[in-house]
Amino acid sequence: MSDSTPGLNSEQLGAYFALMEVSSLLQYAVDEHLRADGDLSYVQFQILARLVDAPEGRLRMTDLADGVVYSRSGLTYQAGLLEKRGLITRSSSPDDERSVIVTVTDAGRELIAHVLPGHVDRVRQLLIDPMADEDIATLSAVLGRVRQHMRAIPPRSAKPRAKRDRAT
């Protein structure tokens, strides 16, 4: 850290570590439930849930990657696993041959409907129940501002790909 970069004070550091720990603990518990109840990873659940919520149950692959904050290659791999299970389909976009459209199938909708009640119970038990209504409103406002600030940076899908040096 350079001298011109201010460090974090103890309160800021404590907030950062608490956020990271809560996030990790919640994601671990949710992931554990999704694997046991639906044989889904957390990112696979996010993909299916976003598709179920999307108009006509379909999204462009790049929009999906930006929404779930996942790499293009990682999303392609996860989509392949979901497609093999018959939970989604992938097809070329009629508007842009470079784009891939991902669509949730009826089986994907059924799986989300199956795992969602347990998912909601786990989130409520671990995150919502320990807070008062005012805490939830405050947390939502604060995290909403932070998310908006972080999302103002161009999405990963819009960033140029890193160039590799190739020996000739």
Image (tube, rainbow, N blue to C red):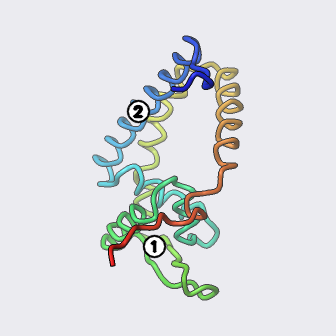
Relative to 122, residue 67 above or below: below
Please, what secondary structure does the residue beneath circle 1 have? loop
Question: 127 or 8: which is nearer to us?
Answer: 8
Relative to 22, residue 56 above or below: below
Relative placement, left or right, of 32 versus 126 is left
User: Percent position (x, y) of residue 45?
Assistant: 43, 54
Identify which amino acid the numbered label 2 is placed on.
Ser
User: Percent position (x, y) of residue 60?
Assistant: 57, 72
Q: Residue at x 33, y 73 (%)?
A: 167
Q: Residue at x 30, y 48 (%)?
A: 35
Q: Nearer the viewer, mark 2 or mark 1?
A: 2
Whole-number angstrom distance, CA of label 2 to CA of label 1: 30 Å
User: Percent position (x, y) of residue 43?
Assistant: 42, 53
Identify which amino acid the numbered label 1 is placed on.
Thr
Mark 1 lies on residue: 105
Mark 2 lies on residue: 24
Please, what secondary structure does the residue beneath circle 2 have? helix
Mark 2 or mark 1: whose residue is earlier in sequence: 2
The crowd level at tag 1 (other Cα within 10 Å; few <14, some 14-19, many 20+) is: some
What residue occupies the far top of the structure in this picture?
10
